[in-house]
Image (cartoon, rainbow, N blue to C red):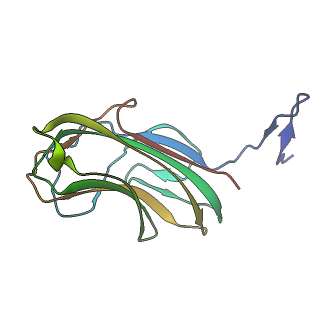
Amino acid sequence: SNIGITVSSDGYVTTPNIPIFSAYLNAQETNFVKGDWRTIPFDTLDFACSHYNTTNKEFTTPIAGKYQFNVFVRVDNIDTAADYYQLALNAGGTLYYGPIIDPGGFSTDLVYFHLAYPYVLNLGASTAVKVQIYQAQGSNQSDIQAGNNQSKWSGYLIG
């Protein structure tokens, strides 16, 4: 028999097929190129319910709805000569801009910096979502740190 919803005796509701994932960067991305939106290749799953593709590094919405996404990225070797660094979610070709840092106010290059980004998007079915980063100007010296506690993103259907 097919069971769509289970309610425990304490009132907890669970479903067997909720769209959810958590992915992280397995290998450090070194010297990423400035001047272009670069997809961060989150290639390793902590867990998923089949809607995250580790080959193209995208989550595809199985149904229309509101989705909560959480991103944190550790950027190493931030160049003070850069105008800015910025994260974005790319959902079906539309960029939803996230945190931005202007490193020009620092006296030396930053050894590391975390960018964190929670976002709720109302998306249609079959929308591909990926995380991107942009560096304006400066040198191609910055790295995205790998590891499941350094650079990670997750998402799930909330309604």
Residue 76 sits above or below residue 117 on the image: above
- Residue 115 appears left or right of 92: left
Residue 107 as seen in the image, left or right of residue 120: left
Pick the quarter of the image with the C terminus.
Answer: bottom right
Residue 40: percent from the left, percent from the top? 32, 50
**Residue appearing at x 12%, y 59% in the figure:** 137
Counting from the top left corner in percent of width and height, residue 49 is at 59, 45
| Res 30 seen here | yes
Residue 54 horizontal side relative to residue 114, left or right: right
Task: Determine which quarter of the picture holds residue 144.
Answer: top left
Seen from the viewer's position, the closer of residues 62 and 119 is 119
* Residue found at x 38% / y 58%: 88
Instruction: Reply above or below: 154 against 60.
Output: above
Q: Nearer the viewer, residue 112 or 158?
A: 112
Determine the residue positioned at 58% across, 66% down: 123
- Residue 143 percent across, percent down from the top left: 19, 42
What is the x, y in percent for residue 38?
A: 26, 58
Q: Is residue 27 visible?
A: no
Nearest the eye: 15 or 34: 34
Foreground residue, 2 or 5? 5
